[in-house]
Amino acid sequence: QVQLVESGGGLVQPGGSLRLSCAASGSILSIKAMGWYRQTPEKQRELVATITSGGSTNYADSVKGRFAISRDNAKNTVYLQMNSLKPEDTAVYYCNTIPIDRSLWGQGTLVTVSS
């Protein structure tokens, strides 16, 4: 059974950077479009970045120009480079396929942007 494990979150000051990783236990990442999602207690889960199996990317307007999604199919890993972080980026970040496979939701990784 494939599992997705997110890592790389933490506490960072406004304007700082973090790189999140999403590691898959199987080779699903090489054949699936993948996305990074985020959720706070106040908001529904939001799709922030996507990447196709061919490497085409797309971003939510709120993160465009600051976040970059990438993938390393050999390592079965998808990354999210987050720069110029803002307090409103504070959330639990998850990865999943596009479209979502509910069985793949992991624990997520918490990103807190605060001074």
Image: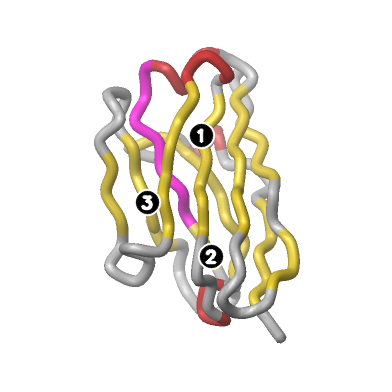
Q: Residue at left 30%, top 30%?
A: 55
Left or right of 85, for residue 58:
left
- Residue 5 or residue 57, whichever sits in front: 57
Q: Position of residue 17 (x, y in %)?
A: 59, 62
**Amino acid at pointer 2:** Gln
Q: Which residue is mark 3?
A: 49
Q: Is residue 72 above or below residue 62?
A: above
Of the image marks 2 and 1, the number of the one nearer the N terminus: 2
Q: Residue furthest bottom?
A: 115
Q: Position of residue 38 (x, y in %)?
A: 51, 60
Of the image marks 2 and 3, the number of the one nearer the N terminus: 2
Select label 2 or label 1 by which is in front: 1
Q: Which residue is mark 1?
A: 78
Left or right of 5, for residue 84:
left
The image quadrant that residue 66 belongs to is: bottom left
**Amino acid at pointer 1:** Val
State the CA–CA distance, disc 2 to disc 3. Answer: 13 Å
> Is 51 inside the magenta-drawn segment?
no
Which numbered disc covers residue 39? 2
Select label 2 or label 3 by which is in front: 3
**Amino acid at pointer 3:** Ala
State the CA–CA distance, disc 2 to disc 1. Answer: 18 Å
Mark 2 lies on a secondary structure that is strand
- Residue 112 or residue 98, whichever sits in front: 112
Which secondary structure is most common in the magenta stretch? strand
* Residue density around tag 2, few if under 14, some if 14–19, many if 20 or more, within 10 Å: some
The image quadrant that residue 57 belongs to is: top left
Magenta stretch, residue numbers: 31-37
Q: Position of residue 71 (x, y in %)?
A: 45, 30
Mark 1 lies on a secondary structure that is strand
Q: Is residue 96 above or below residue 14?
A: above
State the CA–CA distance, disc 1 to disc 3. Answer: 11 Å
